[in-house]
Image: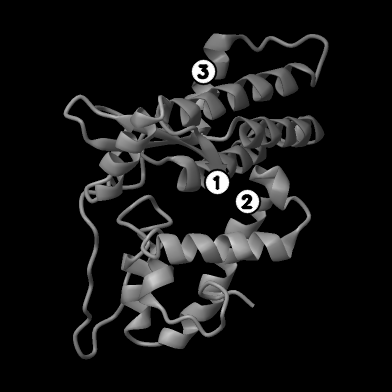
Amino acid sequence: MTGLVRCASAPWWSLCSAKRSERGLAKPETFDFLGFTHICWKGRNGGFWLQRITTAKRLRAKLKQVKYQLMRRRHLPILEQGRWLASVVRGHLAYYAVPGNHRAANAFRRELSRHWLHALRRRSQRHRLNWERMNRLIARWLPPVRIVHPYPKRALTLVPEAGAQCGNSARWDLRGGPPARAVPTAIGAFYRSELYLLARRINEHLLRWAMRKFKRLKRRPKRAWAWLNAVVRRTPRLFAHWWLLPSPTGRPVGAG
């Protein structure tokens, strides 16, 4: 299935799907996290697929910001505008160009091109800029949309040898690669205590997400921490840092 990311090791999916079917519910609802809308999907072969697309709210906010900056920079030379826009597109693709998100990434580039055309036409009341000429500028300065992150195929289990270096393996998870257990395994083999701060930050993001998601946890951090502790005890392998690292406190790993 093109454009979707397959989770190679997700035994919990069949159990979750069976429970929801027994209760007469549809597939799990979508949720927003770290700028992506996560969508659960069942492939033709019955396997679990996870699609990540850019959150609509983030996309609109970014385009609005770029439009404002283009109107401020419209009297600058085309060379400077093109270089700046190229850096904007490259930065956007460096984060959002994950498998399954090609349509949203292409929409960002297309809308940015429309805003650039509008800004250039506002430079003068006697503009001669048509789409034929504009397409040449777009092809010259804006990088094409392509998926820059790999498709995850299997969980990465790395046991570094003596004198080995981490390289890029510790960044695979942020790039849409193997599951998050790659980060603690690669770095934790050398400096395990350095991961406590990272684990704490992850749990804080999960806490804020839960407080926004559930009304009963809104503005109640103590109750939210209790809920998160219950989730850790119920499903300790849901996140890699919950079972690969020891918990220094009674709260989930990394909780202050």
* Amino acid on which the number 2 mark rests in the picture: Trp
- Residue 71 in percent (x, y) is at 79, 30
Q: Is residue 194 left or right of residue 77?
A: left
To which residue does mark 2 refer? 209
Q: Residue at x 29, y 43 (%)?
A: 15
Question: In what element is the residue under mark 3?
Answer: helix
* Amino acid on which the number 1 mark rests in the picture: Phe
Query: Mark 3 or mark 1: which is in front?
Result: 1
Circle number at residue 33? 1
- Residue 140 in percent (x, y) is at 48, 30
| Residue 168 seen in render | no
Q: Residues within 10 Å of mark 3 (few under 14, many from 20)?
A: few
Q: Residues within 10 Å of mark 2 (few under 14, many from 20)?
A: some
- The extreme front residue here reads 22
Question: In what element is the residue under mark 1?
Answer: strand
Q: Is residue 169 left or right of residue 253?
A: left
Q: Tell me if residue 92 comes above or below residue 70 in the rendering.
A: below
**In-front residue for pair 238/190:** 238
- Residue 175 in percent (x, y) is at 40, 53
User: Disc 1 vs disc 2: Cβ atoms closer than 8 Å?
Assistant: yes
Q: Residues within 10 Å of mark 1 (few under 14, many from 20)?
A: some
Q: Which of marks 2 and 1 precedes in the sequence?
A: 1
**In-front residue for pair 187/150:** 187
Query: Mark 2 or mark 3: which is in front?
Result: 2
* Amino acid on which the number 3 mark rests in the picture: Asn
Circle number at residue 135? 3
Q: Residue at x 52, y 85 (%)?
A: 248
Q: Quadrant of residue 170?
A: bottom left
Q: Quadrant of residue 241?
A: bottom left
